Image (tube, helix red, strand yellow):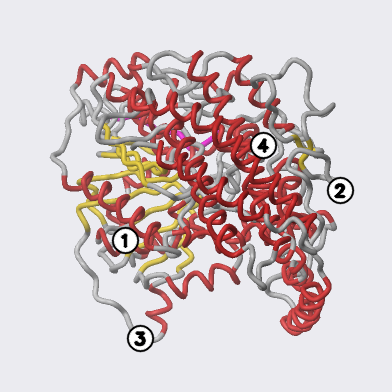
Amino acid sequence: MDHRPVYSTLEAVCVDTISALSGLEGSPHSDATAGLLATMACIQEHGRAVEGLVTGFTAVYHHFDFDAETPGNGYRTLVKVVHSCILHIIQKGRYIATNCGGVFFRVEHNAGEMETYCKALCQLRALLYLARRLLGENGHGELYSQDRSLSERFVREYASMHKACFYGRCLGFQFSPSLRPFLQTVVISMVSFGDNYKKQQTRLGRAALSFIKSGKYVVDPELRGAEFEHITQNLDMHFWKTFWNITETELISSLASITSNTVQVNLTLTVPGEPLILPLSSDPSLSITVPPPLAHSGPGPIYMRLISHSLRQGQDSAELLGFSRPEGFQRSLAVGLRPQRCLPSPWLLLHFHGGGFVAQTSKSHESYLKSWSRDLNVPVLSVDYSLAPEAPFPRALEECFYAYCWALKNCRLLGSTAERVCLAGDSAGGNLCITVSMKAMSHGVRVPDGIMAAYPATLLTTDASPSRLLTLIDPVLPLSVLYKCITAYTGTDNEPVRPNQQLDTLGALGQDTALLLGDLTQGASSWLQALLKSKPTASSSVNGSTNGPREATPYSENMPEGSREFPEGFEPLRSRCLAEIQTPCTPIMYNPFVSPLLAPDCLLQGLPPVHLVASALDALLDDSVMFAKKLRSIGQPVTLTVVEDLPHGFLSLSQLSKETQEASRICVERIREVFLQEPATVTHRQQSSIRKTNIADS
């Protein structure tokens, strides 16, 4: 793609806008006009500098792709994000140049809009400088830096750089337009929830009241951005667990179920942790005993959810019902609508959910799992593994591996003959799909027939990469939150664990509906008053100090010594609210069962076909690209698909837009390929080699 027209257009728009505004300097809004003129001149300067940086990246970034048919890596993404920002500036600049002399032109509003994008372009320019440093120090085709000091410098930059501009007026500018209203709702809700969390509210009415009183964050995007920056940087892991688990509440899940597909079977299973005896895949006449999960808390039950679009033989058996609390077909039986049983499926899909290893269950992912069961006509078993920091590594891996072995042994109860078994998961769940398969190989039991991993986390270290630079601007996965998840899963989170009932402000969902309605009425009134009384705050200068407590500042005393990564004459904007980032540092991060990208070839050889589905705008994009490259380099079957314009976690948003629906469809097609491909065999020699390796995973 020739990027030169983008920058020549930006230059022309800046010139035209400055010329049009110059004739308005004697107007009643001359101060705002002067500020807008200064902003356009600043954008012009940033654009000229960014063009040179982008030229350097476009000359080489194809060397970092998986292959010529799959363009995608962090360097490409940074260029793409910069161009998205510039295209918004061009569109707004054209509007200003055309309408600035009109009676209804709002100078202050347009000045605030353009100033925010100017700040964003300034910070993106800084990211390009950091990426250029990575490019110069990494090996050919390598996306992750092995230089720990370089990664530490990036963390210091992240801690002090201004990020609020990406969470206010230009929130989600890099994503599909259909997702921006949803992202805005999430950010406003999170900021409101943060206020409530700090006050330790415990009633649903009060929680709902805080959401409705969020009118000030609707009318004042600068305040919203500053508060969101503060929350993402400085609230603890328990806040994130509580907020993410809102999707687990009956109220939210009931609303989600309205738009989801109807299934005949939706059972939650509780399987006791007892030793399992399975045949060795290399010699079925021999067997191996798989122990129950033991790490940290000792033997305990494993929780799963069985979803099936059709009722199949075995799924209504007394043996299975002995493990279950039915949520699906038993309600139909109660009203005399017993569905007809189908034959067992030859396929079985095991699912491990995402949530950063710290939050959510299969309930949060029910919607798309129901669609998958219908589209593939297959039973789906989703595992509700124990979550960190209460249950760090290797507890989740042990439980997922045990659930996989239990499903193989009891497939008839699940409505399947398990002739073909596929593992599927997203984010943390994608990591568990890979590591469960590695554990199956090391134990000598049957390996699944394929893996579909969506935006998986394959490297749980602090190594810097170009796509991880996106954590500076990403409302879904900021760097501080990513590090909190890594810290929790690797067991280095030393924060005391508080009881859930003290944290969950929505814990009283079933209580006092009348009180809720009263609070909603009061909250609505307060929200309307906030809308009427709120006034836009004075916007800060792009290159000067600010009036707010957490606004952007130029290079100042907040910047750590010895971390100047930028050329003479340029500094990114700095935040007065420094991030409190605890950088994870533990050998567990380098365990191959935590970071499969670091696994030795002998643990990866013999993996089933791996299908990776990543997003070009995901901070974990480089995890998928480098893992796909590694598998290909050792002759392992692997595919990589990179979808455009979607954030991390797009599967959970599959009902929101055509783009997310298409991405979910791609995942379904990759799973279907696993079920339809010719069976692969693992030789006795391969299994012997794998068992001899037997790398410790705990």
Q: Which residue corresponds to the image point at 33% horizontal and 37% vertical from the top-left?
A: 1
Query: Upstream in the sequence, badge 4 or badge 2?
Result: 4
Q: Tell me the CA gap for discs 4 and 1.
A: 36 Å
Q: Within 10 angstroms of label 1, few (less than 14), some, or many (20 or more) residues?
A: many
Q: Residue furthest left?
A: 678
State the image coordinates of residue 255 (x, y, percent, origin top left).
53, 73
**Which disc number belongs to residue 547?**
2
Q: Is residue 488 above or below residue 387?
A: above
**Which disc number belongs to residue 480?**
4
Q: Nearer the viewer, mark 3 or mark 1?
A: 1
Q: Are marks 4 and 3 in contact (CB under 8 Å)?
A: no
| Residue in the foreground of this view, choosing between 116 and 326 | 116
Q: Tell me the CA gap for discs 2 and 3.
A: 67 Å
- Find the magenta span and give its range: 287-294
State the image coordinates of residue 425 (x, y, percent, origin top left).
41, 45
Q: Which residue is mark 3?
A: 336
For badge 2, the amino acid type reads Asn
Q: Which residue is mark 1?
A: 373
Q: Tell me the CA gap for discs 4 and 2.
A: 26 Å
Query: Under tag 1, what secondary structure?
Result: helix
Q: Tell me the CA gap for discs 3 and 1.
A: 24 Å
For badge 1, the amino acid type reads Ser
Query: Under tag 2, what secondary structure?
Result: loop
